[in-house]
Amino acid sequence: MQINEIAEKLGLTVLVGADNLKADVTGGYVADLLSCVIAGAKPHDLWVTLQTHVNIVAVAALKEVAGIIVAEGAVVPDATLEKAAQQNVVMLSSPQPVYETVKHLVALGL
Protein backbone atom coordinates (compact mmCIF):
# COMPACT_ATOMS: atom_id res chain seq x y z
CA MET A 1 0.00 0.00 0.00
CA GLN A 2 1.26 3.50 -0.75
CA ILE A 3 1.55 6.38 1.70
CA ASN A 4 -1.00 8.47 -0.20
CA GLU A 5 -3.62 5.72 0.15
CA ILE A 6 -2.98 5.41 3.87
CA ALA A 7 -3.05 9.18 4.37
CA GLU A 8 -6.37 9.44 2.57
CA LYS A 9 -8.02 6.54 4.40
CA LEU A 10 -6.86 7.72 7.83
CA GLY A 11 -7.41 11.43 7.23
CA LEU A 12 -3.76 12.26 7.81
CA THR A 13 -2.33 15.68 7.05
CA VAL A 14 0.81 15.76 4.93
CA LEU A 15 3.30 18.03 6.70
CA VAL A 16 6.30 17.39 4.45
CA GLY A 17 7.10 15.14 1.51
CA ALA A 18 4.10 15.50 -0.78
CA ASP A 19 6.34 14.44 -3.68
CA ASN A 20 7.09 11.09 -2.03
CA LEU A 21 3.57 9.89 -1.25
CA LYS A 22 3.73 7.09 -3.83
CA ALA A 23 6.29 5.25 -1.70
CA ASP A 24 5.28 1.74 -0.70
CA VAL A 25 4.64 0.91 2.95
CA THR A 26 5.28 -2.68 4.01
CA GLY A 27 4.85 -2.44 7.78
CA GLY A 28 4.75 -0.22 10.79
CA TYR A 29 6.70 0.60 13.90
CA VAL A 30 5.55 2.40 17.04
CA ALA A 31 7.99 3.91 19.53
CA ASP A 32 9.07 7.17 21.06
CA LEU A 33 12.55 6.06 22.13
CA LEU A 34 14.91 6.66 19.24
CA SER A 35 17.13 3.77 20.28
CA CYS A 36 14.15 1.42 19.97
CA VAL A 37 13.41 2.72 16.47
CA ILE A 38 17.04 2.29 15.47
CA ALA A 39 16.97 -1.28 16.77
CA GLY A 40 13.57 -2.33 15.48
CA ALA A 41 12.21 -0.31 12.57
CA LYS A 42 12.61 -1.71 9.07
CA PRO A 43 12.91 0.04 5.71
CA HIS A 44 9.48 0.98 4.31
CA ASP A 45 7.79 0.94 7.73
CA LEU A 46 5.55 3.81 8.77
CA TRP A 47 6.79 5.05 12.13
CA VAL A 48 4.15 6.31 14.56
CA THR A 49 5.41 8.56 17.35
CA LEU A 50 4.65 11.50 19.61
CA GLN A 51 8.18 12.86 19.24
CA THR A 52 8.59 16.02 17.18
CA HIS A 53 12.22 17.07 17.68
CA VAL A 54 14.65 17.21 14.79
CA ASN A 55 16.41 13.95 15.73
CA ILE A 56 13.44 11.90 14.53
CA VAL A 57 14.32 12.90 10.97
CA ALA A 58 17.86 11.57 11.29
CA VAL A 59 16.56 8.26 12.63
CA ALA A 60 13.93 8.02 9.89
CA ALA A 61 16.55 8.63 7.21
CA LEU A 62 18.96 6.16 8.81
CA LYS A 63 16.33 3.41 8.94
CA GLU A 64 14.85 4.31 5.52
CA VAL A 65 11.31 4.28 6.86
CA ALA A 66 8.54 5.19 4.43
CA GLY A 67 7.50 8.07 6.65
CA ILE A 68 6.73 9.36 10.12
CA ILE A 69 3.23 9.80 11.52
CA VAL A 70 3.16 12.24 14.42
CA ALA A 71 0.07 11.35 16.44
CA GLU A 72 -2.27 13.34 18.67
CA GLY A 73 -2.00 16.43 16.48
CA ALA A 74 1.34 17.26 18.11
CA VAL A 75 2.84 20.46 16.74
CA VAL A 76 6.01 19.77 14.78
CA PRO A 77 8.63 22.54 15.01
CA ASP A 78 9.67 24.30 11.83
CA ALA A 79 13.26 23.07 12.26
CA THR A 80 12.04 19.46 12.17
CA LEU A 81 9.91 20.08 9.09
CA GLU A 82 12.80 21.82 7.32
CA LYS A 83 15.16 18.94 8.11
CA ALA A 84 12.58 16.42 6.89
CA ALA A 85 12.24 18.33 3.61
CA GLN A 86 16.03 18.37 3.19
CA GLN A 87 16.25 14.62 3.89
CA ASN A 88 13.19 13.70 1.76
CA VAL A 89 11.44 12.22 4.80
CA VAL A 90 7.64 12.13 4.59
CA MET A 91 5.98 13.51 7.70
CA LEU A 92 2.28 13.11 8.39
CA SER A 93 0.07 14.27 11.22
CA SER A 94 -2.73 12.30 12.82
CA PRO A 95 -5.26 13.99 15.10
CA GLN A 96 -5.91 10.62 16.74
CA PRO A 97 -4.07 9.21 19.75
CA VAL A 98 -1.28 6.75 19.02
CA TYR A 99 -3.45 3.74 19.89
CA GLU A 100 -6.25 4.81 17.52
CA THR A 101 -3.79 5.63 14.74
CA VAL A 102 -2.14 2.22 15.01
CA LYS A 103 -5.51 0.47 15.25
CA HIS A 104 -6.51 2.05 11.91
CA LEU A 105 -3.19 1.06 10.31
CA VAL A 106 -3.69 -2.54 11.42
CA ALA A 107 -7.23 -2.49 10.02
CA LEU A 108 -5.71 -1.51 6.65
CA GLY A 109 -3.52 -4.59 6.76
CA LEU A 110 -0.21 -3.22 7.99
Image (cartoon, helix red, strand yellow):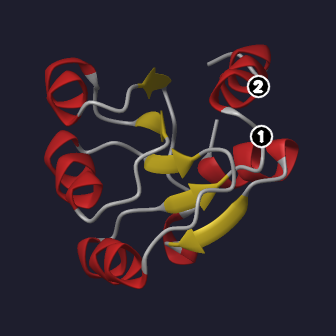
- Which residue is pictured at 20% across the width and 57% down the height? 55
| Quadrant in the picture for the N terminus | top right
- Relative vertical location of residue 75 with respect to residue 81 in this rendering, above or below: above
Element type where label 2 sits in the image:
helix
- Which residue is pictured at 43% across the width and 75% down the height? 77
Q: Which residue is mark 2?
A: 100
- Relative vertical location of residue 87 with respect to residue 6 in this rendering, above or below: below
With 55 as the anchor, is 45 left or right in this view? right
Q: Position of residue 91 (x, y in %)?
A: 50, 61
- The tag on residue 96 is 1
With 16 as the anchor, is 12 left or right in this view? right
Corner quadrant of residue 58: bottom left
- Relative vertical location of residue 30 with respect to residue 1 in this rendering, above or below: above
With 52 as the anchor, is 10 left or right in this view? right
Of residues 40 and 27, the one drawn nearer to the viewer in this rendering: 40
Mark 2–mark 1 CB contact (< 8 Å): yes
Q: Position of residue 48 (x, y in %)?
A: 50, 36
Of residues 103 and 63, the one drawn nearer to the viewer in this rendering: 103
